[in-house]
Image (cartoon, grey):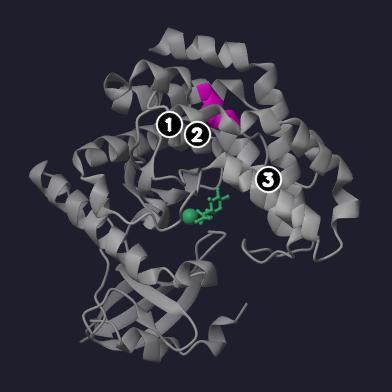
């Protein structure tokens, strides 16, 4: 990955409609896909901050469609927030236009986009604080509720089959077969484990196909660090990372939050003994999600929330293992075997979730 010094940040910022002179740029954010920087601009002695992002190469090819989606979704949210007396500058992402009128620039190598920086906000990398996790549930739930009036046909499916677990499984099989890095022999146990859970793949996709579970406009990447919290009040403020906003299922959105937040350890914890599914946290999230969204969910959605958690965790683990087999080309990694260690935490969580699946279902009934 390029180092920040190597980027011609000043020139890139100059391509956006930003008034003032460039002061500095520091890397921030914990995303696995894009590179994120906080940029400071001096406008006649007044410092203003922006968020600059360099898109992952795999997303860059779809940048037009991606930014079309983000512009539509953010402007829809902005109107909604204004109508409800909220503060759109802090409760919504605000993309900055490039001087050529587009919402991104291409510097010959990478695509960049810019947003207003949301001041006085913070993110969390774990759900140790129950209030934080509860707030994230309410914030993601409200986001889904807000978008329920949004016409999904306006959106491109930028990342087709993003949560199609069957397709993810075939990609995984192809990676095992090609084994371009010769890593498959070292992960036979993990490969066998994924294969033995293949029966999970159709559990939600098939119900979407049959119409039992409705498609809605969902976020599709609802991990805790994709919500920003107000530093002063501790309240959930804004949902970020909108690259994956597409038609999807609330079972996925609910499930991905559980996958990340109900892990007793980090997503990439190398010591698997530390990794456990925390049922209490699951109940906390369930309460917050139901508060925000419960009355709009149909029975099939409610019944499949626990399966959404199992599936998102299974799928995510499979994606990490696939990337490991393909040579760590998609997710950011900072050490060897990190993707493998990520995959292992997910598989451990799936085992523990399956063991308490009945309890997970009972909690839905109880809270609903
Ligand atoms: C990626 O961008 P980030 O870090 O919020 C990924 C998600 C995975 C997640 C795993 C566009 O999310 O699908 O669940 O990593 N986003 C994309 O931590 O692939
Ligand atoms: Mg993110």
Give the residues drawn in magenta, as a range. Answer: 306-310
Answer above or below: position of 179 versus 96: above
Q: Which mark is residue 205?
A: 2
Q: Badge 3, how many Cα within 10 Å: few under 14, some, many 20+?
A: many
At 86% across and 48% down in the image, what residue appears? Answer: 187
The picture quadrant where one finds residue 367 is top left
- Horizontally, residue 117 falls left or right of residue 222, namely left
Q: Which mark is residue 56?
A: none
Q: Mark 1 sits on what residue? A: 208
Q: Which mark is residue 318?
A: 3
**Residue 62, how many percent across, how many down?**
41, 68
Q: Badge 2, how many Cα within 10 Å: few under 14, some, many 20+?
A: some
- Horizontally, residue 310 falls left or right of residue 112, namely right
Q: Earlier in the sequence, mark 2 or mark 3?
A: 2
Mark 2–mark 1 CB contact (< 8 Å): yes
The kind of secondary structure element at disc 1 is helix
Q: Tell me if I can see residue 12 in this picture.
A: yes
**Residue 309, how many percent across, how many down?**
55, 30
**Residue 283, how many percent across, how many down?**
50, 20
**Residue 297, how many percent across, how many down?**
32, 22
Main SS of the magenta segment? helix
At 30% across and 87% down in the image, what residue appears? Answer: 15
Answer above or below: position of 360 versus 190: above
- Horizontally, residue 232 falls left or right of residue 161, namely left
Q: Tell me if I can see residue 338 in this picture.
A: no
Q: Badge 1, how many Cα within 10 Å: few under 14, some, many 20+?
A: some
State the CA–CA distance, disc 2 to disc 1: 5 Å
Q: In front: 118, or 322?
A: 322
Q: Does the closest atom of ligand 1 sit within 8 Å of the Cβ of label 3?
A: no
């Amino acid at each position: 990955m390029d180092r920040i010094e190597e980027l011609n940040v000043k020139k890139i910022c100059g391509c956006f409609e930003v008034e003032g002179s460039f002061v500095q740029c520091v890397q921030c954010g914990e995303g696995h896909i894009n590179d994120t920087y906080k940029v400071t601009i001096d406008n006649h002695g007044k410092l203003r901050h922006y968020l600059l992002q360099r898109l992952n190469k795999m997303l860059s090819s779809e940048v037009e469609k991606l930014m079309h989606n983000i512009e539509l979704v953010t402007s829809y949210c902005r109107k909604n927030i204004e109508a409800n007396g909220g503060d759109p500058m802090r409760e919504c992402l605000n993309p900055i236009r490039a001087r050529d009128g587009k919402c991104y620039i291409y510097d010959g190598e990478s695509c960049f986009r810019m947003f207003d920086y949301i001041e006085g906000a913070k993110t969390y990398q774990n759900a140790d604080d129950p209030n934080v996790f509860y707030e994230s549930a309410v914030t993601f739930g409200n986001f889904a509720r807000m978008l329920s009036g949004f016409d999904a046909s306006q959106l491109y499916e930028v990342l087709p089959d993003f949560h199609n677990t069957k397709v993810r499984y075939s990609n995984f099989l192809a990676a095992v077969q090609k084994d371009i890095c010769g890593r498959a022999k070292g992960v036979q146990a993990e490969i066998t484990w994924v294969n033995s859970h293949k029966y999970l793949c159709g559990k939600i996709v098939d119900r979407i196909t049959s119409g039992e579970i409705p498609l809605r406009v969902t976020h599709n990447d609802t991990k805790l660090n994709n919500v920003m919290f107000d530093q002063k009040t501790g309240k959930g403020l804004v949902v970020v990372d909108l690259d994956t906003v597409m038609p999807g299922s609330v079972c996925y959105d609910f499930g991905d939050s559980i996958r990340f937040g109900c892990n007793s350890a980090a997503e990439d914890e190398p010591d698997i003994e530390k990794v456990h599914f925390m049922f209490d946290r699951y109940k906390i999230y369930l309460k917050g999600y139901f508060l925000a969204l419960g009355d709009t969910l149909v029975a099939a959605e409610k019944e499949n929330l626990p399966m959404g958690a199992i599936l998102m965790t299974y799928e995510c683990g499979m994606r990490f293992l696939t990337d490991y087999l393909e040579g760590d080309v998609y997710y950011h990694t900072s050490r060897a075997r990190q993707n493998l260690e990520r995959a292992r935490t997910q598989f451990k969580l799936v085992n523990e979730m399956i063991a308490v699946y009945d309890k997970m279902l009972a909690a839905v009934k109880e809270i609903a």
